[in-house]
Amino acid sequence: MTQQYVAGELSLLLAQLRSVATDEGSAQDVFALRREAETLPPTWLSSVTTRAIALADRICWESIARGDAVAFSHQAEAAARLHEFGVCAQLLDDDQAIFHRR
């Protein structure tokens, strides 16, 4: 994969995560990460991905705490796609990967 493709795909996945954020603060945090993915050098994509997954995790837990199962379902799906991409694009270290390759 080219670095431009990786950055573009990460940006798209972050846009999807932002669309399921249920509060403005989280949406702004995702927007900031998306901007980083689009503007920082490719060497930063791993860091952006790691922070995006942590943010997605926080967003999911906030929905669980509110008892919002519908929002959680959409957020968990977006988080899973983000994680899978991070693993496949080798932006995550093996110890960060929830699902290890076989």
Image: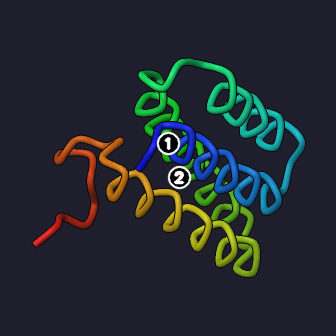
**Residue at the extreme left:** 102
Nearest the viewer among 12 and 83 is: 12
Query: Picture coordinates of residue 51 (x, y %)?
Result: 51, 34
Answer with left or right where residue 77 lies relative to residue 39: left
Q: Residue at coordinates 33% horizontally, 55% vertically from top-left?
A: 87
* Secondary structure of the residue carrying numbered label 1: helix
Mark 1, residue position: 54
Task: Examine the rendered structure and indicate whether residue 44 appears above or below residue 90.
Answer: above
Label 2: few (<14), some (14–19) or many (≥20) C-alpha neighbours in 10 Å: some
Quadrant for the C terminus in the image: bottom left
Q: Is residue 90 left or right of residue 80?
A: left
For the residues labelled 2 and 1, the Cα–Cα distance comes to 5 Å
10 or 48: nearer the eye? 10
Give, as a three-letter code, the residue at label 2: Asp
The image shows residue 21 at horizontal and vertical percentages of 79, 55
- The kind of residue on which mark 1 rests is Ala
Identify the residue position indicated by label 2 in the image.
57
Q: Nearer the viewer, residue 3 or 99?
A: 3
Taking the spot 37% from the left edge, 51% from the top edge, the residue there is: 89
Q: Are marks 2 and 1 in contact (CB under 8 Å)?
A: yes
Q: 37 or 25: nearer the eye?
A: 37
Residue sitting at 50 percent across and 42 percent down? Answer: 54
The furthest residue to the front = 2
Horizontal side of 5 relative to 99 (left or right) equals: right
Image location of residue 91, percent across then percent down: 35, 41
> Measured from the top left, where is residue 7 in percent x and y?
57, 40
